[in-house]
Image: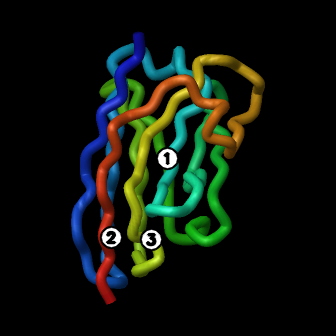
């Protein structure tokens, strides 16, 4: 059983930065895709960033692509999301997700992920 625990959320002013971390209970490389999703009430969950752990391929939501980086730290079984130049529209609950199946691509669809963390809140004020 895989467990994912997020940390690093908080409240920042527009233009600030946050680093979200997700620690997995098992070997992170068993999880072929690791992803960060976010959700605001009344809206669908959207994929912010994804990483194919086998080859390090990364995928980003267009609105965060130039100011975010997803990365793996295999030694700590951690996947991090560094977000810079945060804007009020980035306010959401952020979730870490993992898929242990290998399709050589990481989907942006939430129902493709087997495991989820509890979420960490990010709030950006103007």
Q: Is residue 44 left or right of residue 1?
A: right
> At x 44% / y 40%, what residue is drawn?
96
The residue singled out by tag 2 in the image is: 17
Is residue 15 rendered to the left or right of residue 34? left
In the image as oriented, which residue stretches furthest toward the front?
42
Closer to the chain start, of discs 2 and 1, is 2
The residue located at (71%, 39%) in the rendering is 107
**According to the image, label 3 marks what residue?**
90
The residue shown at (27%, 56%) is 9
Compared to residue 94, the image places residue 107 above or below, namely above
Sequence-first disc among 3 and 1: 1
Looking at the rendered structure, the secondary structure element under dot 2 is: loop
Mark-to-mark CA distance, 2 and 1: 16 Å
Q: Is residue 89 above or below residue 72?
A: below
Question: Above or below — where is 103 with respect to 51?
Answer: above
Q: Where does the image place residue 28, in percent across and percent down from the top left?
A: 45, 22
- Secondary structure beneath dot 1 equals strand
User: Which residue appears at 70% of the width and 19% of the height?
Assistant: 102
Residue at mark 1 = 36
Position of 77 with respect to 55 (left or right) is left
Asked which colour scheme the image uses, the reply is rainbow
Q: Which mark is residue 106?
A: none
Local crowd size for mark 1, using a 10 Å CA cut-off: few (<14), some (14–19), many (≥20): many
* Crowd around label 3: few <14 · some 14–19 · many ≥20 (10 Å): many
Quadrant location, the N terminus = top left
Q: Is residue 91 above or below residue 70?
A: below
Element type at mark 3: helix
Image quadrant assignment for residue 78: top left
């Amino acid at each position: 059983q895989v467990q994912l625990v997020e940390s690093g959320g908080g409240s920042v002013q527009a233009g600030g930065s946050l680093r979200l971390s997700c620690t997995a209970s098992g070997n992170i490389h068993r999880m072929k895709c690791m992803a960060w999703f976010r959700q605001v009430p009344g809206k669908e969950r959207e994929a912010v960033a994804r990483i194919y752990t086998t080859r390090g391929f990364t995928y980003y939501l267009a609105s965060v692509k130039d100011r975010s980086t997803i990365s793996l730290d295999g030694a700590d079984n951690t996947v991090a999301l560094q977000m810079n130049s945060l804007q009020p529209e980035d306010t959401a609950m952020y979730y870490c997700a993992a898929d242990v199946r290998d399709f050589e691509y990481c989907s942006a669809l939430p129902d493709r992920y087997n495991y989820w963390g509890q979420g960490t809140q990010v709030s950006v004020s103007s």
